[in-house]
Image (cartoon, rainbow, N blue to C red):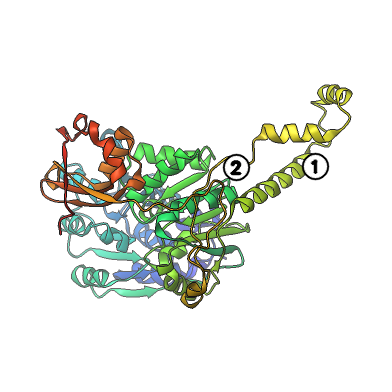
């Protein structure tokens, strides 16, 4: 028996659920579906992956008049990826009703394609607020017959600054509609939205489950802020993951890490909200197909992405919310496989690590920074295991018999042959790793006992140089619609000024002030050849950053 029958779900939908081998509702579905079928507004709090899409989609589909050509259901999502994922799930539930249609509207895709979809008169529209408003303004979308509105991941939409867009959209639809709001967290601004736009909503709160820490090995490395990127290189060389996600808290840091890792020869690419959809799709496909091993993303850009086989996730930045940490590390250790969650933290983050341990009820183990010897030893171990595995698989491989006999006739001692083959594999690291100051693994009391000069061994190590900073003023500002990362990328790509040379960037109305290492000033000679948004650049050195 399909237990959705107990929730009064229609037989046609249950038939489709059976095809998907879905017979038991999740807690969020079990509590939300009856309320929504009764016509109540609902606020649902549940983590990603708990089945909330079906929780609001099943009642929505059951309420649709399939003979009508009007949009009756609108589902708003914060990202393109989540919009697409929601549409895929809904299509599963309407596949046996040819009269029902769903259209997905999001930025980054051609208008023509979306015009054609809208011309089919979909009863369900899923999309992001910005492009939805665009289509309203073009006269392609009307919501005057909408009777069911869903705000999916409402907390993320409001954090991304979509409140004004949401209010614009809601003003175009009937006030007596039914509303469903689903969110991973319920901060105060969510409550205000609910009070303003919802009618005595029923609250459904599903406690997040404790993480299966047995499947996810959680560790932390402590390092000074200026050495985080150098540590990241060591981590990647030490573990040699074939598939890893790195999370950063900002778009600018995603861009920076992509350029940084690519400069070291890693197959890496990034995802954030500023990328065009075609590029986002290409990056995701490259990661799925293992054309790139490293995907760097913000939390918002990673919403709706579901990729198996991720060996580890790395928190380059510690997330600001506990739920985001859970969401991140849950991407590894799936389908019975082991996973690893690595967090890079400064000393100031120690209390935050304790909070995450308490929240996940799991140990986040501090580990010493991998030394060059550690990295080479790990490389040897990985190579040994690969050789043994391949040797077992190739016991009956006779493709190289002639060549083997030819080599054996020349040399009787196999050791030089093995060494030659290992050299050809070029597996030993050839990097000159920058020196990283070791921080103690435990408390601040222990930190005082540690010598300030206790540093990791590194080849050709040098003392860390203290670099003096200068401040430059350039002739573009807010009126020119520039962003700090746009300037950093431009100076990096065109003037070859590495990102590590930049400090604080303050953008005023007509001017921008940039803190930069003095030794990088010599690269600014060619700045007058550069343009931003059609405006030629010039600069001058000033005394300090403005307050």
Q: Nearer the viewer, residue 339 or 289?
A: 339
Q: CA distance from mark 1 to mark 2?
A: 27 Å
- Where residue 369 appears, as percent x and y from the top left, is 55, 59
29, above or below 542, in the image: below
| Badge 2: residue crowd in 10 Å (few <14, some 14–19, many ≥20) | few
Q: Is residue 165 visible?
A: yes
Instruction: Tell me which residue sits at (69%, 46%) in the image.
Output: 380
Residue 273: x, y in percent? 32, 48
Which of the two residues, 52 or 92, is positioned nearer the viewer here? 52
SS under mark 2: loop
Compared across the picture, whether 121 is left or right of 347 comes to left
Image-quadrant location for residue 539: top left
The image quadrant where one finds the C terminus is bottom left
Q: Is residue 120 visible?
A: no
Left or right of residue 530, residue 430 in this image: right
Mark 1, residue position: 392
Mark closer to the chain start, 1 or 2:
1
127 lies left or right of 510: right
Residue under the point 46% across and 65% down: 326
As drawn, 248 above or below 8: above
Residue named by callout 2 = 429
Q: Quadrant of the N terminus?
A: bottom right
**Depth check: 484 or 441 in front?**
441
> Which percent across, then down, holds residue 88?
42, 48
């Amino acid at each position: 028996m399909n237990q959705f029958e107990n929730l009064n779900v229609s037989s046609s939908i249950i038939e489709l659920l059976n095809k998907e081998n879905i017979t038991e509702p999740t807690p969020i579905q079990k509590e939300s579906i009856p309320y929504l079928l009764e016509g109540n507004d609902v606020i649902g709090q549940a983590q990603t992956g708990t089945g909330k899409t079906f929780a609001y989609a099943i009642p929505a589909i059951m309420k649709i008049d399939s003979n009508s050509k009007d949009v009756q259901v609108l589902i708003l999502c914060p990202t393109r990826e989540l919009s697409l994922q929601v549409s895929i799930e809904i299509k599963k539930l309407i596949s046996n009703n040819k009269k029902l249609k769903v259209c997905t509207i999001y930025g980054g895709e051609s208008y023509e394609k979306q015009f054609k979809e809208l011309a089919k008169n979909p009863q369900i529209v899923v999309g992001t607020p910005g492009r939805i408003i665009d289509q309203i303004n073009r006269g392609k979308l009307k919501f005057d017959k909408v009777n069911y509105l869903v705000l999916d991941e409402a907390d993320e939409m409001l954090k991304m600054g979509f409140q004004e867009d949401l209010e614009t959209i809601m003003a175009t639809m009937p006030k007596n509609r039914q509303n469903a709001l689903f969110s991973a967290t319920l901060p105060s601004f969510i409550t205000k939205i609910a009070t303003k736009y919802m009618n005595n909503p029923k609250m459904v709160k599903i406690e997040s489950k404790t993480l299966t820490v047995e499947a996810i090995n959680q560790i932390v490395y402590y390092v000074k802020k200026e050495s985080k990127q150098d540590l990241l290189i060591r981590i990647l060389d030490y573990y040699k993951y074939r598939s890893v996600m790195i999370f950063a808290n900002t778009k600018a840091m995603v861009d920076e890490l992509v350029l940084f890792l690519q400069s070291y020869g890693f197959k890496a690419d990034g995802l954030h909200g500023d990328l065009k959809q075609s590029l986002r799709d290409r990056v995701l496909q490259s990661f799925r197909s293992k054309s790139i091993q490293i995907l760097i993303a913000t939390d918002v850009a990673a919403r709706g992405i579901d990729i198996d086989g991720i060996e580890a996730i790395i928190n380059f930045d510690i997330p600001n919310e506990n739920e985001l940490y859970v969401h991140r590390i849950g991407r590894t250790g799936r389908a019975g496989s082991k996973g690893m969650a690595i967090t890079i933290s400064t000393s100031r983050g120690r209390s935050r690590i304790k909070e995450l341990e308490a929240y996940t009820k799991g140990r986040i183990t501090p580990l010493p920074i991998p030394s060059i010897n550690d990295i080479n030893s790990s490389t040897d171990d990985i190579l040994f295991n690969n050789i043994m595995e391949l040797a077992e698989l190739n016991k009956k491989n006779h493709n190289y018999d002639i060549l083997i006999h030819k080599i054996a006739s020349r040399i009787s001692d196999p050791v030089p042959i093995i060494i030659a083959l290992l050299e050809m594999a070029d597996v030993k690291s050839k990097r000159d790793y920058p020196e990283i100051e070791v921080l103690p693994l435990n408390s601040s009391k222990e930190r005082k006992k540690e010598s300030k000069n206790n540093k990791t061994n590194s080849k050709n190590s040098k003392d860390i140089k203290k670099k003096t900073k200068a401040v430059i003023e350039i002739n573009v500002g807010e009126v020119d619609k520039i962003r700090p990362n746009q300037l950093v990328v431009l100076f990096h790509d065109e003037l070859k000024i590495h990102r590590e040379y930049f400090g604080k960037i303050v953008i005023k109305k007509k001017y921008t002030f940039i803190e930069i290492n003095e030794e990088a000033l010599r690269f600014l000679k060619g700045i007058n050849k550069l343009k931003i948004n059609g405006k030629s650049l010039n600069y001058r050195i000033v005394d300090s950053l403005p307050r």
